[in-house]
Amino acid sequence: MHILCDAYVVFFIVCFLIALLPWLSCFNVDEKNKMSFSGPVEDLFGYTVQQFENSEGKWVLIGSPLTGQPAKRTGDVYRCPVGQNKGGVCEKFLLPESTTIPNINEVKENMTMGTTLVVNPDGSGFLACGPQYGYMCGKQQYITGICSNVSSSFKVLNSIAPTVRECKQDMDIVIVLDGSNSIYPWYPITDFLVKFLEKIDIGPAQVGLMSYGDSVSHNVSLNQFNNKNDLLKEAANILQKTGLKTMTALAIDTARKEAFTAERGARQGVKKVMVVVTDGESHDHYNLKKVIDQCEQDGIERFAVAVLGDYNRKNKTSEEINKFIVEIESIASEQKSDHFFNVSDEIALVTIVDVLGSKIFALEATSENHTSSFEMEMSQSGFSAHTSKAGVMLGAVGAFNWNGTVVMQSGQEFVVPKNNSFHIPEEQRYEGMAGYVGYDVQSAHTPHGVLYITGAPRFNHSGQVTVYRFDGENVTIIQKLKGEQIGSYFGSVLQTHDIDRDNYTDILLVGAPMYMGPERDEQGQVYIYKLNESGLFEHEMTLKPVNQTCCMAHSQNNCKSVNKNEPCGARFGTAIAAVPDLNLDGFNDIVIGSPLENDHRGAVYIYHGSQKSIKEKYVQRIAAGGDGKSMKFFGQSIHGIMDLNDDGIIDVTIGGIGGAALFWSRDVAELLANMTFDPSKINLQQTCQVQGRTTVCVKTEVCFKYRIKPDKHTNTGTGEEVMRELYVLTLDSLRAIARGRFNETDSRRLQKNESIVDSFCREHTFYTSASKSVFLYARGPHKLLLCYVEHLSVDKNHKTKHLKPEDLSLIKARSSLIKGLRPV
């Protein structure tokens, strides 16, 4: 009869890979056999990298935004061939020469081509941008940015500069000079006048000169000179009007009525500008308000300059000075801060020439009555770029007075969203001022449509990420994610990724590379947000780098070695790359750059995907070697979307300043372990004969299944891949005295060396050496069997290779938990 008992024995079958403990530290990327590309550090060679393939072969594209320095620094992009016998010699595209906008006075010096570099998702070409590209409108330079659209055959298809505007500098400028006796000396007035006129592009702009005291005189009419040199000679010789009175209201009214007339050369539809320079309160101040209102009705933009020389020479009281300033300020148009100036004396007038000139030249190109509120003139379009099936996004951080915006592609056109699309001054007050919207741009694909994402790292000083929809014309804000530390540059780096490969975005990664650590060092952080079913991003975790100890010359702590470079830290999150499945587990992965680590040598971290997110612990950290001089800031740029050596696995390109390296991904070895028992339940009837006595016997079958991924490397018959393993079985591993022994060894421990081709199974028998009472009165589960795979090697084409941690990217051992093996 069978003996039944309440206590039971549970067999845990656990397989550890001793050669690769822990398996999470197994490396996917070969750090030794990389392909390197080098270039000048001073050119920022390696600032951006992209992988590319066309009919000519496979390439690494490398941005070098300061190429041509120190003279021009136009920047450029290099193409570096990949493959055997290619030699890794990189060649310039010479993009600045072929990237151009017709009919404007271009400024390509310092255009920094290659600052932004992205490949098209369909492989049809790539986009390279120079956000510092500019052009001249008269003497005013605007920095609008430009991008070069390059085909797969490396031909420039067209230049994209959606924020370039036609120069509209047609202005009629009348300068009204106070020539009363209190102005002294007179020569600083003419010096100021000459220097100011030198900055005006005579032709598109006309200048009239008037002076006044007791009465008003026309010195130069608007249409009198169309040659700057002649105008300058005339201005230098203007005599002081003199007079005992300062009739400012009369002078302004005369200029309005007479100087801005067709008879004196005024043009219809051209901007009217008046500049008034005076050194004292007017004797007809009672007429000023009426005169100013009439100028406002006539659309005359007014600049007023108060010269305090006479007040200071006569030691006038502060009340008298303030009264004078208030009067002259009333002459100026709104905004007063842009239209009103005061200087200590006549000689100091020349100090405001540059700023006054820039304010006036900004008039026609910017919104009315806001001379310093730039719209697209300093936009730096292409500071960031993102290409997707939905179209192209161009970050324009300098737009709208450096609040920034995102230029969106709608069909074949590019649309600049309205000024208040990302920043509503009435609601946010000054929080968004100079926030740099567009510092980075991304998109997310959801079942409900496309979400667009942009970062503003200076928003409220702590940074903000804005998620929005775009209907081809208008922006609708969906969500705002805010940074948590001032100066962290939260939102400066963005990346979305589809982890589970279902064609929908799963996570958003937001870099804050200047996040301060506990030692006031720029360690950096990366925030992970999961996209929920409602289409909103929820914070899931925050990734941090290996802590960097800051040992500077002025450090108080005891340091073994002193860092040579500042700032100290890591700047983890400077680059974030969404890469396909590196370890072939079915989930896409993430690579993050940390370019300041190890005294600015740099490092990168690889994170494996899992389900709809990533694992919080990195699986590999690749640290840069070398002296930190020929290349530094390794991890400044990262890209990995292609198999560049045709082994079936995605490879990763990592850039630093002064070079880039292509790292080959390794094959993935997968080992599946399983054990079964016969009988599945222990029969405590002693029906087995061992060494002349009856006992309880159990048969166990140990099975291993082995394969190399990708599948193209599995056994084809031309060269078998064989895994040689040493496995060890141990009974009652956690007990001092085992309750069983293997028949083969008459010991609790069994060790075997085997070779596996595809799969392998081996049967072993063990018997119980303890009495029945041990099983009858045992309490709780007992770990009776432990399986180790202690050493591995692979034969391929009869060549043996011992596997070390750096040789295999991953070996998976799937454990089997057998719960039903109990006494009956």
Image (cartoon, rainbow, N blue to C red):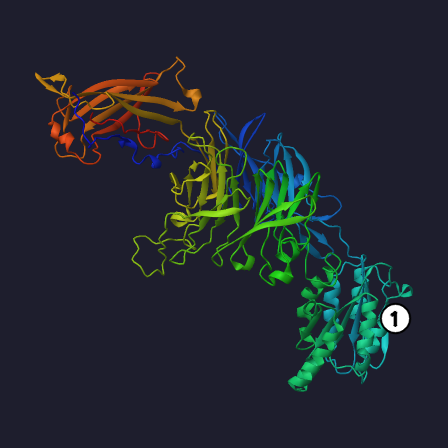
> Number of marks in the image?
1
In the rendered image of this protein, does residue 784 appear above or below residue 798?
below
Q: Is residue 552 left or right of residue 397?
A: left
Q: Is residue 272 left or right of residue 36?
A: right
Q: Position of residue 114 (x, y in %)?
A: 58, 42
Quadrant for residue 151, please give it.
top right
Residue found at x 72% / y 66%? 195
In this orientation, which residue lies closer to the viewer: 743 or 35? Answer: 743
In this orientation, which residue lies closer to the viewer: 325 or 64? Answer: 325
Residue found at x 64% / y 49%? 476
Q: Amino acid at mark 1?
A: Lys
The answer to whether residue 585 is visible is yes
Residue found at x 18% / y 32%? 733
Give the residue at the far front of this rendering: 1
Residue found at x 87% / y 59%? 268
| Tag 1 residue | 257
Q: Position of residue 470 (x, y in %)?
A: 65, 45
Give the residue at the far top of this rendering: 717
Q: Is residue 166 left or right of residue 224?
A: left
The answer to whether residue 631 is visible is no
The quadrant of the picture occupied by the C terminus is: top left
In this orientation, which residue lies closer to the viewer: 452 or 594? Answer: 452
Give the residue at the far left of this rendering: 692
Could you say whether the residue bearing mark 1 is in a helix, strand or loop?
A: helix
The quadrant of the picture occupied by the N terminus is: top left
Q: Position of residue 272 (x, y in %)?
A: 81, 64
Q: Position of residue 518 (x, y in %)?
A: 38, 57
